[in-house]
């Protein structure tokens, strides 16, 4: 996900889960963990709307080893280069259900982590409050549009070692979790817009030049 329009191998991969509830603690040592990932990784160009890998459901992650760890490092490096707050594997052309994030919540607390095979948990109606903020995407460069999403989200999946985890977010971070999970099931945020707003987002993309390298569409 794009930033909002205002603005010796270290074990750095997976935050520690809280006992009992399975939620990861993704705020501790956030800066050091993100830095370790991207220093090991190699930045890759970003796929953009129209690339087939973005418009289909990705494959489940079934192997949790060095290859996945290296991919996650590359994803953090790519996210940093593109100045994003979240990145799904298919945004660098990899057909796997994994995303990374380096995203603040509405209190300015930084969350850093990676989650494989994410599934959004259904919210009870009482917890479903919509936030109609602006949203952008690295795969729809330079474009922004207002999109209502719940202001609280819980995603369950697996960490880089295959252990079950849950991640929860509020406000901007909740939007990021929903946005990145959508990617892995073949949806871009513009697919949730009205025809008029989608057309406007694509116009913004066509009229501007991204600050980062992108993959030419076939």
Image: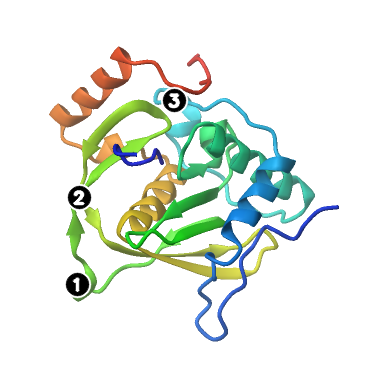
Side (left or right) of 207 relative to 71: left
Farthest bottom residue? 20
Q: Any mark on residue 125, and which?
A: 1
Is disc 1 surrounded by few (<14), some (14 to 19) or many (20+) residues within 10 Å?
A: few
Q: For the point 33% across and 16% down, which residue is it?
A: 208
Q: Is residue 57 left or right of residue 197?
A: right
Dot 2 falls on a residue whose secondary structure is: loop
Which quarter shows the N terminus? Answer: top left
Picture coordinates of residue 68 (x, y %)?
A: 70, 48
Nearer-N-terminus badge (3/2): 3
Q: Earlier in the sequence, mark 3 or mark 1?
A: 3
Q: Residues within 10 Å of mark 3 (few under 14, many from 20)?
A: many
What residue lies at 57% left-to-right and 67% top-to-bottom?
28
Name the one closer to the observer, 128 or 7: 7
Q: Nearer the viewer, residue 208 or 190?
A: 208
Q: Which residue is mark 3?
A: 48
Q: Which residue is mark 2?
A: 148
């Amino acid at each position: 996900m794009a930033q909002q329009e205002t603005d010796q191998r270290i074990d750095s991969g997976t935050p520690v889960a809280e006992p009992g509830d399975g939620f990861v603690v993704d705020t501790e040592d956030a800066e050091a963990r993100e830095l370790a990932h991207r220093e090991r990784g190699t930045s890759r160009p970003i796929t953009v709307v129209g690339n087939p890998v973005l418009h289909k459901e990705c494959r489940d992650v079934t192997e949790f080893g060095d290859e996945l760890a290296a991919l996650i490092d590359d994803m953090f490096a790519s996210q940093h280069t593109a100045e994003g707050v979240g990145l799904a594997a298919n945004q660098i052309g990899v057909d796997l259900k994994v995303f990374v994030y380096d995203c603040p919540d509405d209190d300015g607390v930084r969350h850093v982590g990676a989650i494989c095979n994410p599934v959004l948990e259904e919210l009870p109606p009482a917890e479903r409050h919509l936030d109609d903020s602006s949203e952008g995407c690295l795969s729809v460069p330079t474009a922004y549009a207002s999109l209502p999403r719940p202001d609280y989200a819980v995603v369950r999946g697996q960490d880089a070692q295959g252990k079950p985890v849950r991640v929860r977010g509020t406000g901007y971070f909740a939007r990021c979790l929903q946005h990145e999970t959508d990617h892995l099931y073949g949806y871009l945020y513009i697919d949730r817009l009205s025809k008029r707003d989608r057309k406007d987002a694509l116009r913004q993309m066509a009229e501007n030049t991204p600050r980062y390298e992108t993959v030419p569409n076939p």
